Amino acid sequence: MTISSRLKERRLALGLTQHQLAQLAGVRQQTIHRIESGTSVRPRNLLEIADALNCTPKWLLMGDATPNSSGQNNAAQ
């Protein structure tokens, strides 16, 4: 699995649109679209996106372990 597929899978699991995720992460919707399409991945945005998805940057990048070991969903709160 790639960062693109992990991001999209996690976003959909949380019931978020690209626009909603972008707002939560403080980035443009185009940024989310580019990452999901595999066009661009900028490390500076990964921390904010991981936080918005309530997962670790390491999981987004490498798929190690589970997205969120606590099972909480900050994005949906």
Image: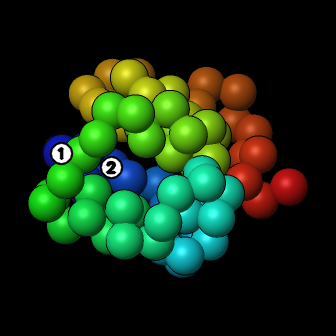
Q: Is residue 39 left or right of residue 17?
A: left
Name the quarter where the C terminus is drawn. Answer: bottom right
Q: Residue at x 46, y 71 (%)?
A: 29
| Res. 1 mark | 1
> Across the whole image, how many numbered discs are drawn on residues?
2
Q: Vertically, is 33 above or below 71?
A: below
Residue 26 seen in render: yes
The percent coordinates of residue 70 (x first, y second) are 70, 27
Q: Is residue 38 left or right of residue 77?
A: left
Could you tell me the amino acid type at mark 1?
Answer: Met
Q: Nearer the viewer, residue 14 or 3?
A: 3
Q: Nearer the viewer, residue 11 or 13?
A: 11
Q: CA distance from mark 1 to mark 2?
A: 7 Å
The local secondary structure at tag 1 comes to: loop
The percent coordinates of residue 54 (x first, y second) are 63, 40
Within 10 Å of disc 2 (Cα), the crowding (few <14, some 14-19, many 20+) is some
Residue under label 2, please give it. 6
Could you tell me the amino acid type at mark 2?
Answer: Arg
Q: Residue at x 29, y 41 (%)?
A: 42
Name the quarter where the N terminus is drawn. Answer: top left
Labels 1 & 2 near each other (Cβ < 8 A): yes
Q: Is residue 14 left or right of residue 18?
A: right
- Please tell me which of labels 1 and 2 falls first in the chain: 1
Quarter of the rendering containing residue 59: top left
Q: Vertically, is 58 above or below 15?
A: above
Q: Vertically, is 43 above or below 28?
A: above
